[in-house]
Amino acid sequence: MADRDTEGSKDYQVDVPARSEPFFLKGSNELDWGLKNRLANIFDPSSGRTVMLAFDHGYFLGPTSGLERIDLSIVPLTRWADTLMCTRGILRTTIPPTYTGGIVLRASGGPSILKELSDEQLALSIDEAVRLNAAAMAVQVFVGGERETQSIHNLTRLVDMGNQAGIATLGVTAVGTDMVRDAKYMRLATRICAELGATYVKTYYVEKGFDTVAAACPVPIVVAGGKKVPEQDALRMAYGAVQEGAAGVDMGRNIFQSENPSAMIQAVRKVVHEDFKPHEAYEFYQTLKHETA
């Protein structure tokens, strides 16, 4: 009988208090279990940081340089990525379902590079995100842009849907041609995203005052890689970002357009997860590059 199994029970350890450990991510302690579990598939619990591999550029740029054949350029790199940021089309057609890291789905879209980019709408349903086992959904937010209110409304709707399903929302702060990339603007844009419910925020690194951007944002910040720059500069940027409070990087072109993408993503990991200094990470990159030449 099942009830007899408890007759000899005695290992209650009444002198040992029950554990109640805080969640490792900033601003995430009160989230639901499922949402925190998904965040742990984006951020490494050991370091509290992430290396996101972004290749969602095609949603408005088409076949970007380096992304002409994602099966050949990106899939071999996924082994070193904590999470992938992509579109549902690429996820379904190209990414092996054996990949076990977090998936961040591009959830907004609309105009192509030929039109005004700020006029985006939500382009993904919550049912679709659940079907694809997404850890997070990403939405572009154009603070200060012509269609600022529309993009913020996209964010708040996505937050509501995500919270209902236990899926994180990534607010991506877009910077238009007329906006100054300085700490004042980044503080404004990231704080607005966090205040309106984004689980974490993606923004750009600024060399002067980024620590104030990270300090003023109550949720984790990941830094966008931006346009392709020399490998040393990209590693220097990643180092500055994480040392000044970022919880990782979301890097695309500075990895897949690198002369040696596999060596570059591994060097970025050394900076983000092991605090390698830029010159140490670059030496590591050069060593791997020569080994695989």
Image (spheres, rainbow, N blue to C red):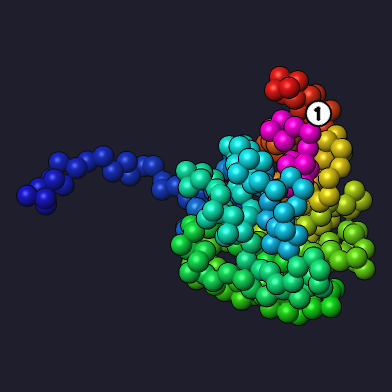
In the image, residue 74 lies at what x, y percent?
64, 43
Q: Which residue is drawn at 45% across and 47% down?
A: 19
Where does residue 240 sit, x and y in percent of width and height? Answer: 83, 42
Q: Which residue is drawn at 77% across and 41% down?
A: 257
Q: Which of 189 and 4 is in front in this view?
A: 189
Q: Can residue 216 be seen in this view?
A: yes
Q: Which of 196 and 21 is in front in this view?
A: 196
Q: In this view, does 85 lie to the left or right of 259?
A: left
> Residue at coordinates 64% horizontally, 73% vertically from top-left?
122
| Quarter occupied by residue 142 | bottom right
Q: Is residue 247 visible?
A: no
Q: In this view, does 24 lie above or below 193?
A: above
Q: Which residue is situated farthest in the left direction here?
A: 1
- Measured as percent of width and height from the top left, residue 3 is found at 11, 52
> Quick one: 272 or 214, which is closer to the camera?
272
Q: 118 or 3, which is in the foreground?
A: 118
Q: Mark 1 points at which residue?
A: 282
Q: Which of the 4 image quadrants contains residue 254? A: top right
Quadrant that contains the C terminus: top right
Q: What element carries label 1?
A: helix
The residue under label 1 is which amino acid type? Answer: Tyr
In this picture, which residue range is highlighted in magenta? 252-263
Please indicate whether residue 239 sits to the left or right of residue 207 in the image. left
> What residue appears at the point 6 percent right and 49 percent down from the top-left corner?
1
**Residue 258 located within the stretch drawn in magenta:** yes
Residue 290: name its quadrant: top right
Crowd tier of the residue under label 1, counting other residues whose Cα lies within 10 Å: few below 14, some 14–19, many 20 or above: many
Count of numbered labels shown in the rendering? 1
